């Protein structure tokens, strides 16, 4: 019995329109999940995050287990209550950040040992502990612990890594406590190798999960190889379960992946870019630190209805950035998250109307056109 | 003809309840003005600032003339439009910051020459230029340029400085373009010297202003000397005009100054303290970085109705601070500004009911009681 209900409403080519129901509410797919690493989507109130259209956020198990600690979050009643986000939350397993952020790690069959980047203390993360932590965090969607295979790597290393992840996936499933509205996702690995990806998908399906993630992409292989890997992976995933491409990505990546049958995404790009002065628009990315915006009375995007574009000029945002004001990060993040959610909504509407090809053509043409001209 | 209408509604002892009407709306006095130095109240949206109860904010002429430049703000339609704050704005003259922030200044009868802390460029600020800049910023309340007398200083130096400020006040008045809803405030100087304060007040009254500020206090003289200086200054100010104590202060300072007949305040304390982890409460100041808050599920103040206290625990705020999250500054600032506005509202209500002594006794007892006990 599955803990998460997924309704597939309509398809357009390989793209899918659906609704995923969780304990804390529904998620319209395709969906983009803003990243709330340390139990906060940086520079945003939860109400503002919801106001951009986001229905689900992602939180990072690695960060939260180190600070404030999963046991502490549980004592506070779980992440939703702790951080004042009443909607669904997906937590990653911590595996990816152990590899990328911690020191002195040791990878064994049992799990991974690492040193905290916060205080230098040693920790061990096993598939069972990763599940336990995510239960304590009260994640609606829990991810299995996996090894994110380095890229590039020799075929044998990719295969060994994938097979370890599959054994960990089976242990994760066994440790997961089933409950209505809560679900566990497996993660397909196998690098950019079609056969390994297929074997990984089949191994996960044999175990049985509420959803299937594609991991180990957007790690330097490039868009073409990422897309071709999706082409040889997604067909092996069950059509009645949600599919989640982890850590992706740029607007063009989302459009291409949705056209290849992906339903869910997460990425730090809109939030991190917001804090580094980059604004996403239908007509490409703008560096608001650029002096050409200094006297511009127009919003970032005159067609955008977000809080930042409704109330502030490019000139003001440029000023806030120059003055290193916190409001700059707040407004830029707000705009970027709104842009990402509007893109998702546009894709969902296009799938609903069977007009995804036309939507994609307009998207590509507008991105290529570049910034609107000054009046 | 006065540009600002001031209605004195009621008094309780020397304390006054009033309403000051400006071009951008009314201000209930006693009033606390949050500081929006660089055309933003740091870490707050304007809507959030208004939500705390603030009706007027202060912006700093020195910062804005250097960046983004007064001419630029004027091209954007003035500060209200530029920063999305539709309410009243008071701008200081820039004089105080020239003395405290800039380098290589030269003080002459004509004005003051200084080097920008932003880009090292030389600027000159005269009484006329200070008024012109504030007109370009579209300030509802403009302040005369004055010299903030250093403390401590010899009597002769205090007198000379005060007299220069009075000559500058006359030039400021002459340069000010009168308009309905817009007003010019003079600034009483004279250090902690009763006779100089009286002479300064009389000189300003002879010139004639829409309101009278008390400057040159809270510069290290201590609360007792500040209060005794107010005691010998306020009686010389016209009762039918608002009185503004510049750059003050702590909650106890506001209560004491209101009891001495002051109507308006500004201070960076609630906002700056919010960014350095200090929370103001009825029962004193809390350092939210302190580990004792780590597991505390209670809000900063259970009796506070602010956004932070309505939705977040001390434990969560402590976590945000430890993780250096922007939301920490946002929530702490929000709470502190709300506390200051509630204190002002409490004082206004007490004056309206003739119960200021009782209010003051409760205020002092609660401040002395210290933090609420853990449950």
Image (tube, coloured by chain):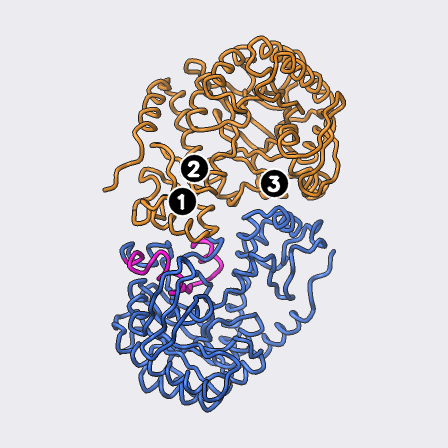
Chain colours: A blue, B orange
Which residue lies at the image location 43% right of the left edge and 55% below the top edge?
A46
Which residue lies at the image location 62% right of the left edge and 23% below the top edge?
B148
Query: Would you name the residue on which mark 2 appears?
Result: B338
Instruction: Determine whether, in the image, residue A312 is placed left or right of residue A18.
Output: right
Give whichever of discs 1 and 2 has the lower sequence position: 1
In the rendered structure, does residue A268 fall within the stretch colored magenta? no
Residue closer to the observer: A119 or A207: A119
Query: Do the numbered discs 1 and 2 sit on residues whose CB atoms are within 8 Å?
Result: yes
Q: Position of residue A360 (x, y in %)?
A: 59, 76
Query: Would you name the residue on which mark 1 appears?
Result: B307
Question: Magenta part of the protein: which range?
Answer: A45-74
Dot 2 falls on a residue whose secondary structure is helix
Residue closer to the observer: B266 or A163: A163
Task: Say whether mark 3 and mark 2 are on the same chain.
Answer: yes
Query: Would you name the residue on which mark 3 appears?
Result: B38
Give whichever of discs 2 and 3 has the lower sequence position: 3
Q: Position of residue A144 (x, y in %)?
A: 35, 75
Q: Position of residue B190 (x, y in %)?
A: 60, 15
């Amino acid at each position: 019995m599955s803990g998460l209900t997924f309704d597939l409403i309509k398809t357009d080519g390989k793209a899918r329109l659906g609704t995923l129901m969780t304990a804390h509410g529904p998620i319209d797919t395709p969906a983009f999940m803003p990243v709330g690493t340390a139990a906060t989507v940086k520079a945003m109130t939860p109400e503002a995050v919801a106001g951009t259209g986001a229905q689900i956020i992602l939180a990072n198990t690695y960060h939260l287990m180190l600070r404030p600690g999963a046991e502490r979050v549980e004592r506070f009643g779980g992440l939703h209550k702790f951080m004042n986000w009443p909607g669904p939350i997906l937590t990653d397993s911590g595996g990816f950040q152990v590899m990328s952020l911690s020191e002195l790690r040791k990878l064994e069959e049992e799990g991974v040992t690492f040193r905290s980047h916060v205080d230098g203390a040693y920790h061990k993360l096993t598939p069972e502990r990763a599940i336990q932590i995510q239960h304590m965090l009260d994640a609606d969607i829990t991810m299995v612990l996996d090894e994110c295979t380095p890229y590039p790597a020799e075929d044998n290393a990719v295969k060994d890594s994938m097979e370890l992840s599959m054994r960990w996936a089976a242990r994760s499933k066994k440790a997961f406590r089933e409950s209505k509205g809560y679900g566990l996702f497996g993660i397909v690995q196998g690098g950019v190798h079609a056969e390994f990806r297929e074997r990984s998908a089949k191994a996960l399906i044999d175990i049985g999960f509420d959803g299937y993630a594609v991991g180990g992409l957007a790690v330097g292989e490039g868009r073409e190889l990422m897309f071709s890997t999706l082409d040889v992976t997604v067909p092996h995933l069950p059509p009645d379960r949600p599919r989640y491409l982890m850590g992706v990505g740029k607007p063009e990546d989302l459009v291409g992946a949705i056209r290849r049958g992906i339903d869910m995404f997460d990425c730090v790009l809109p939030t991190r870019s917001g804090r580094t002065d980059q604004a996403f628009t239908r007509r490409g990315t703008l560096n608001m630190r650029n002096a050409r915006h200094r006297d511009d009375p127009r919003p970032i995007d005159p067609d955008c209805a977000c809080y930042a574009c409704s109330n502030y000029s490019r000139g003001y945002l440029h000023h806030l950035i120059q003055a290193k004001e916190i409001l700059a990060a707040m407004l830029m993040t707000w705009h970027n998250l709104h842009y990402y959610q509007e893109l998702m909504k546009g894709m969902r509407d296009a799938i609903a109307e069977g007009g995804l090809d036309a939507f994609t053509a307009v998207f590509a043409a507008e991105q290529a056109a570049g910034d609107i001209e000054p009046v």
